[in-house]
Amino acid sequence: MKTLICIGECMVELAETGPGRYARGFAGDTFNAAWYARRALPDDWQVGYASCIGEDAISEEMTAFIEGEGISTRMLRRVPGRTVGLYMISLAEGERSFAYWRGQSAARLLADDADWLEGVLSQADHVHVSGITLAILAPDARARFLDALGAARRQGLGVSFDTNVRPRLWESEAATRAAMTAAAGVSDIVLPSFDEEEALFGDADPAATIARYAGAGARTVVVKNGPSPMLGWDGGDPVEIPVAPVEAVVDTTAAGDSFAGAFLAARLTGADLGQAMAQAATVAGRVIGAPGALVR
Ligand code: ADP
């Protein structure tokens, strides 16, 4: 049995279904990636989700949901006095707007218990984290988290990092750049999106993004670029893979997360770089053609 563990924050989602009526779900970038990886991986891979939750009823409901999706919750740590984060999707004339309540969420403490974190990392063959996993941590906790990842990687752990740049979650652009670069330094696989990298680092083109993350220490980099071709690199010549444009985009939520989950599943089971990119783009294309983060 092999184990993939995704680490980050899963939140309660309330999505407006009609005036003043909401449907409750659970989502979050690294959780979504775990969900897509679970669907794509064979049974000899276990997928787990590691985070912090509360001891309250909604935390238990989230745990039951995750477990029900075939993802192990053994690595959820319960923090007394805290609860899970929440976001609402409101509809105004067909346009979606998001509001978040996550400032005090339990997940912000996921690097506070060094023994727990070390235990999580020691149980994995591969861990997946994102820029949001890093952004929600206090700066000193972020540094401890990256140190723990680096130490585990030196012991043979595989690490992937979806940059998922969310400027509103970061204390400054300089801190964002520093964390992205440090994370690439402890990662085997880095999955950036070109528009975000261009805005944050001023990269001239996807090749520049690859060169920068390769220079930071990444071994594999795949630069996504919406419907434009993806550029991937894993030590040899860069590989360009086209994306079949989706004409009727319904909801781009989780495009990158589903890409990450499908890409990881493919790579962890032996696909070459180009095959894994193509499979991931096929899944992401299906996800943006349907509403919601988790498209069955
Ligand atoms: P992210 O969601 O991480 O910011 P992108 O917007 O680049 O990343 O999209 C991730 C992937 O989703 C792309 O690599 C591509 O495979 C797919 N995708 C995004 N937009 C489209 C589109 N309009 N048509 C087809 N595929 C798309």
Image (cartoon, rainbow, N blue to C red):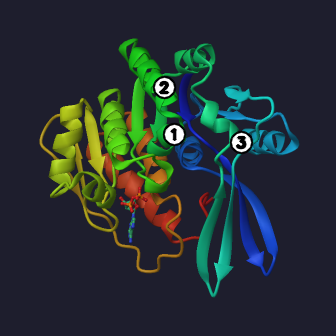
What residue do we see at 61% from left, 30% from top? 110
Estimate the x, y position of residue 277 in percent, counting from the top left: 33, 50
What residue do we see at 87% from left, 42% from top? 57
Which amino acid does the dot numbered 3 rest on? Ile
Residue farthest to the right? 57
What residue do we see at 64% from left, 58% from top? 100
Ligand 1 image position (quadrant): bottom left
Where residue 99 sits, quadrant-wise, is bottom right
Q: Which residue is mark 1?
A: 133
Which amino acid does the dot numbered 1 rest on? Thr
Q: Which image quarter holds the C terminus? A: bottom right
> Label 2, label 1: how many angstroms apart (C-alpha)?
10 Å
The local crowd at label 1, few if under 14, some if 14 to 19, many if 20 or more residues have their Cα within 10 Å, is many
Q: Which image quarter holds the N terminus? A: top right
Estimate the x, y position of residue 275 in percent, counting from the top left: 31, 47
Q: Is mark 3 within 8 Å of ligand 1?
A: no
